[in-house]
Each structure stands twice: as structure tokens, then as C-alpha cells.
Image (cartoon, rainbow, N blue to C red):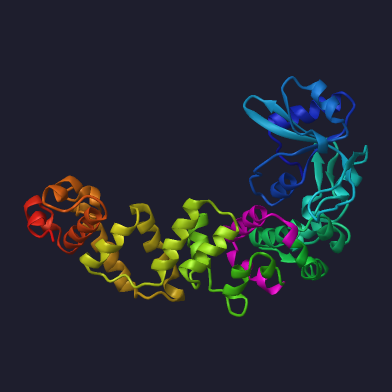
Amino acid sequence: MEIRVPAPVERIIGQLNEHGYEAYIVGGCVRDMLLNREPGDWDITTSALPGQVKELFHRTVDTGIQHGTVTVMVGKEGYEVTTFRVDGEYEDGRHPKSVSFTPNLTEDLKRRDFTINAMAYNKATGFVDEFGGVEDLRRGIIRCVGEPMDRFTEDALRILRAIRFSAQLGFEIEERTQEAIRVIAPNLAKVSKERVQVELTKLLCSAHPERIALVYETGISRYVSGTFDEIYGMGTIPPIPTAIPPQKHLRWAAFLRKATPDQAFTVLKDLKLDNDTISRVKTLVDLLGRPLVPEKPALRRVMSRIEPALYDDLLDLKDALLPFGVPETGDMLRRARALSGEIRRDGDCLDLKSLAVKGRDVMDAGVKPGKAVGEALAVLLELVLEDPSRNTRDYLLQHLK
């Protein structure tokens, strides 16, 4: 089988070959092409040393030169070219203390995490598959290269990567690999929360988000965070239907919907998610547990709390979760969606910006500056949310308390 390699990658490999160096595409791009998936990146491995790579190409960037990686620029695109290497001793369960370069491709492939990521290819040689990656792809198996205990001891993040690849590809984790995950799970405490979060988010946004159950079944959850473990540590994780778009705030909200809003906030804050995502997820978790009353005043109150796009997300989430238990019936959700559309088409006032009176009007009417102005405007907005026809200056000033 021949892999279609992008022309710039072929040119880089060709130029290295012309100067007497071995060069191959390697890792995830080989795996993805064999699975008929579009690779996100094209990584190149070579026998050339970093300095030799830099001599051959006009535009390069030292992206990780201490680990043998030079980015070769072709137009506006960059392609990482890494020298065959052997990792030294891992002292922190995450990074090797040192690396040494080797002329041997097999030695380089031997240090990689899973067999399906330890394959190389170029047009002249074909596939280099020393560890049974092609067969594991055929069988749908995630298996460590060599001894699983060694691979996970070297880099504890590989524990979560195994589960994430299982979720993305729909593969099973090989028995010895899964047993090593259980044993080495405590080492995950050495990994930064940001890196843990990235893997969990990719897992939840995958084709098989239900595989997050493995995080609990293998004992990993207690090393993610105390609150994360507490939420489902003793119970069943609710289904996360793939009908929910693979956007991180939607999938995290679906996963955390049985938690309290404060628990959801704590989990995401512990995992260093961005503040916008944390806010969206907390709001969705809160509203997913509350029934949407299909009446315009009640719907206006909900719509006044959140931005329009997040309100639409809420309706979509409730629709997707309907078979798995939400406070509404299908008829209630259909009516709520129809009424919400009418509220928007009619241009009903939903926030203080659209209110017919402003802070200055309220103060001119005798309300003292400060906190009392905001409180007065909130009362007036509530009157208008109940009945939009009240949104006139005369009516509101007459009802100012």
C-alpha cells in the first residue's frame, strides 16, 4: 500500500535522501493514513542531525532543538523534522533527563508510546513496522511498545493517552496495557493539570465519549482531582450521546450534568480550563437540571440570563439528552423552542440595554445614586419580562418604587 504524502513533505524527505540521510514520515500521520483519516500533522524523522537539517533548508525554526526537532518552513507551513533519538532516564515521570541521537530508526521507534504510533513510511522503503502496529490497527487494539510498565513509568500522561486513543478510534486497550494503567495510575499526580485536561477534553469530544468511564474503572479519577473523582466515583456515568456536537463546553456540560454547578466549577477550575468555558459549563449544568416552563414570561427570564448562542446550546442539549432523562417532555421542548423563536422575532426586551429607561432616568425620578439604581432597574426589567408591552418610559417610571 502506498500513502499519499503531501508534496512539501515529499520534497523535504527527498532532499534529505539526496544528501545521504534516511527520512520517513512517522507516528500519528502514518496511523491516520492507514485508517483513512486526514492527519492533523505530518511529522518527519531522520538520521540527519539538527545542524545538518538546518544546513539543507533555507528557512528553519529551532522548535525543540535540544530534543532534535527543527521545523522546516515551506511557504507558510511548518513541518517538524526530528533526528532519530534514544531517550535517557525519566526522572519526573514526564520528561527524559537527556536524549541522545542514534543512526538507527528502530531505536527511535522503540521509545514511542503505542504500536499504532510507532510506524514509519517513505515511498522508497515502504512501511517500517517493527512492533506490530499494522496488525494492532487491523484488530482495533491499543498496545504499548515493549513493556507497558516501562512506557507508563517513563511518561504518566501516556496513561490518559491510551484511553483517549481508545475513545477516538473505538479501539480496545490490550489487557497487559490496561493492567499497567491501574498500577501506574498514581504517577498521573506528577502531570500538570493542563495536560490532563487536554486529554480529557479530547476524550469527551471523541466519537466514543462514554470511554471516560475507563478513567474511573482504572482508578485514574482520584488523581485527576478530588471533586472529579467524587462526582461519579461511586456511581454510574450518565450517557453522553454523540448527537451532541463535539464542542468542549457542550461535552463537558453533558458529562457533568449530574454534578452541582459548584462541583462543575471546581472540577473545571482544578483542570485549568479557560474562564469562558468554565462559565458556560456551569450555567448549562445549572439550567439542565431545571425544567424549562414553556410559557413566554418564564422563557424570557431564562433568555435574559444568558447569551443567545448559549440559550440555543441549552435547547439542543436538552433535545439530545431527552432519551436519557431531562425535566421536560419532548412536547415541552418543542413548545419552548417555538415560543423562544417568537420572543426573538418580536424583539421582546430581555436585558437592561433594551429597557425603555436608563440609570439617569431612575435617578432623575428620585432614586439615590449607587446600588439602589441597579436594584430599581432590575425590578423594572422583571415587569417587562412578564409583559413586554410594559416597556415604555411612562409605564416604567410610574411603577418605579
Q: Name the image quarter holding residue 140.
A: bottom right
The answer to whether one can see residue 246 in this image is no
Side of 89 relative to 14 (left or right): right
**Left or right position of 112 against 290:** right
Q: In the image, which residues are magenta?
A: 189-218
Residue 320 at x, y = what percent?
A: 44, 66
- The total of numbered circles placed on residues is 0
- Magenta stretch containing residue 194, yes or no? yes
* Residue depicted at 81% across the width and 60% down the height: 152
Instruction: Assign the N terminus to one quadrant of the image.
Output: top right
Place of residue 355 in the rendered image (x, y in percent of width and height, measured from the top left): 18, 51
Residue 217 picture location, percent across and down = 69, 74
Residue 296 to residue 132: above or below: below
Left or right: 214 in relation to 392: right
In the shown orientation, is residue 328 left or right of residue 399? right
Q: Residue at x 30, y 63 (%)?
A: 302
Majority secondary structure of magenta residues: helix
Residue at figure coordinates x 42%, y 63% from the top left:
284
